Every structure is written in structure tokens, then in C-alpha cells.
Image (cartoon, coloured by chain):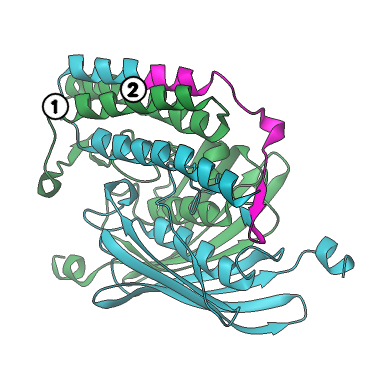
Chain colours: A green, B cyan
Amino acid sequence: MSADEHDRLVALYGPLTDDMRELIEAALRTEAEPDAIATARTAIQAATEALRSREREDSQVVRYSFNGRPLVWNNAVIGLRNAIAPPLTIHQGDDGISCWSEFTMNAAYEGPPGLVHGGVCALVLDHVLGEAASEGLTKPLFTGTITIRYVRGTPLGRLRAEAAVERTERFKSFVSGHLSDAEGITAEAEGIFIKPAWAREAE
Amino acid sequence: MSADEHDRLVALYGPLTDDMRELIEAALRTEAEPDAIATARTAIQAATEALRSREREDSQVVRYSFNGRPLVWNNAVIGLRNAIAPPLTIHQGDDGISCWSEFTMNAAYEGPPGLVHGGVCALVLDHVLGEAASEGLTKPLFTGTITIRYVRGTPLGRLRAEAAVERTERFKSFVSGHLSDAEGITAEAEGIFIKPAWAREAE
């Protein structure tokens, strides 16, 4: 994909997804009258219909790459076009084995009152460890096992996640990372990422 | 909350959230013209404004209970009012130590092409193991550690998750579970759930 086309699509889809994220949060907080909720539903259905005026088929999910990295715009954690993604923007370390992200979790990611759902912490950590293992998704590596240790509750709000490859043994990469708020680490993770057989055979 | 009020709110908010889930999926698939996307954005913003005509404040998140269980409608996995939740409906076993859920994961939960994001598998397993540990969220228990072992890729579509308490030692519950599709298990999980100090002191 050319830089111009990339910029055009980012400008087209990014604000649409951001609008949906605002909608999701408004729906969590609303105490509007039934009439207002009916109005919202009609508007949402109209938006869905407009988007469906032309759509890809299930079997035709197009994937692009840009600057040597896949553009996974539908990804559940980093997807520019996926309203359930917070989204995380991943920064790769210059060393090729680490990465980090700073991001905000709003009420949509809540589990216990005021805290990020423990499973959402696991979702973020799995993704960030996977990014470190795969050098920004440029290598085919899948999670083999991951262990999350919860140090304390992770508050909603501004958070940071980081991960780095500790060592690599043949087809396995051992990766560790953590999630933190301004006060320090809230959850730690260790994962083993595995290169699938088809990728080993291709080497 | 009375049964009537519960039913009224389920009928009010459930379809609104379902409409948003359809919108999220339509946005992932759309190849609509920029004009149609602009139309969709305007409609989404109108819906958000309608919902914001009256809303709770951040500090006033109201939690209800019904039939002795908390109604966590904002929860990121099971929330009736949270469009990022698939949502899972959790069925408690009669034994008080197990639970299961059958649910569908659409393109919004994708990681690798056609597969559920590994972190989303972890999200679901953390939640289901936590439900088993806490007897349907009626006991205060937090995840201490959880380990996920990925057996193979989990395809998008119809899935099942289940979990059961293996044993309990003082403040710790040892829980295991798995995620499966029609062909069998795709990911296994083991977790240790811990009763917090304030809950121990209250006993």
C-alpha cells in the first residue's frame, strides 16, 4: 500500500472507529428516557445500513502491509477499524526484541468496580508479548503458553504495557512483560511463543 | 431490583447493545464510499448525543443485584450494556463449583486470520474460571495467577467455555477450564483465585 493510500484510509476509518468508541461508552453511562434510546437505536441502525452499502465478504478479508509490517486493522487489540480495540499503539524497541505501549482503558474494559477486567489485562499482555516475540508481527509466532500473575488491581485510566524477549531456543521464544500504572506494576506475564511447523519447513 | 424492573431494563438496553454489536461488525467489513461513511458518522454522533441526554457520572456507577447475583451489565465479557462483550451468558452448575457458556465470536474478536485473538481466549477463560471460583460472582475472589495453554488455533464462530473448582485451600481456589469448538479443546487454563484480605477479615 502506498503512503498516500495508507493516510487516506487512516483518515477515513480512524474517526469512524473513534465515534463508535464514544458511542459504546455513552451507552454504558446512559440513563436516557426510552424515547431517546429508541432515537439512538434508529440512528445506529441507519449508520449500519450506510456502512453495509458496500462490504467485503467473509471470505475476502483483505490484509495490507505498509512499511514492511502487516496492517491488522481488524485486530481486537490494535485494530484501527475495530471499535472493541482500545486501541493500543505498539512502539517497537530499537533492539528488535522489545516493545511498549501507553494507552487508556475506559469503562468498557471494566471488571470489578473501577478496575480493569483481569481478562482484559491478560488480553493486553498476550498481545504485547506476542508483538515482542514476533518483531512487530513480522514473524509467524503463536502463543504456546502464557502465565499472568496479578500483583494488584489495575485501575481504569492511563496504563503502560511492555514486553521483551528473554531468550530464544530453536522454535521457542521466551518472553516476559508487565502492565503498570503511575504507581508501578499491576500484573506480570511470562509467555512461550512458538514458530509453527509450516514456518519452520519454509526456512 | 424487582423482576418487572429487571425485565424492563433488559428489554430497553439489550437491543441497543445488540444494535451496536452489528454496527461494529459492519464497520469491520465496510468498503462504502466516503460519503456513506460520513453519513454513518453523523448518525453515530446523533445516537451518542441522544444517549447522553441523561447519564450517570463516573463516580455513580450503579450496581444492582437480582436473584442474589450482581448484575454486572457493564462487564467486558458478560455485560448486557457493553458492546465490546460478546456477550457470554454463564450457566452455573448445580454443584456450585462449575459453570459453562456457549457463545459466538465474530470478526471483532479476530487475531490471526480466521482465528480468535489468543488474548481474547485468555479474556474468556479468565472470566469463566473466575465465575466458577466465585460461585457466579457471589463471592469476592480475584485472579492471583492464570496460565493458558494454547492447544491449537481457536476458529471464529460457535465456541464453548467451561470451568470447575479443583480444590480449595484456605483463601485460595484452584480452578481449571477450557475453551473448545466442535472438534474439541483449543485452549486450556489453570488459575488460582484468592479471597482478598478484607473479605477474610469480615468472616
Examine the rendered structure and indicate whether residue B27 appears above or below residue A189: above
* Badge 1 element: loop
Q: Does the magenta stretch include residue B130?
A: no
Relative side of B15 to B181, left or right: right
Instruction: Kindly report which numbered mark, 1 or 2, lies closer to the viewer in this rendering.
Output: 2
Residue type, label 2: Ala
Instruction: Please tell me which residue is depicted at 64% across the width and 69% down the height of the picture.
Output: B134
Chain of residue at mark 2: A
Disc nearer the start of the sequence (1/2): 2
Name the one closer to the observer, B3 or A116: B3
Relative side of A201 to B174, left or right: left
Dot 2 corresponds to which residue?
A: A43
Name the one closer to the observer, B100 or A13: B100
Examine the rendered structure and indicate whether residue B26 appears above or below residue A188: above
Instruction: Please tell me which residue is depicted at 64% across the width and 49% down the height of the picture.
Output: B2
Chain of residue at mark 1: A
Q: Where is residue A171 in the image (x, y as percent from the top left)?
A: 31, 71
- What segment carries the magenta color? B44-69
Relative side of B176 to B139, left or right: left
- The verdict on a common chain for dots 1 and 2 is yes
Q: Position of residue B94 (x, y in %)?
A: 55, 80
Residue B22 seen from this side: yes
Q: Position of residue B107 (x, y in %)?
A: 27, 48
Quadrant in which residue A140 is drawn: bottom left
Dot 1 corresponds to which residue?
A: A53
Split into 4 quadrants, where in the image is the C terminus of chain B? Answer: bottom right
Residue type, label 1: Ser
Relative side of A87 to A70, left or right: right
Badge 2, how many Cα within 10 Å: few under 14, some, many 20+?
many
Examine the rendered structure and indicate whether residue A104 appears above or below residue B40: below
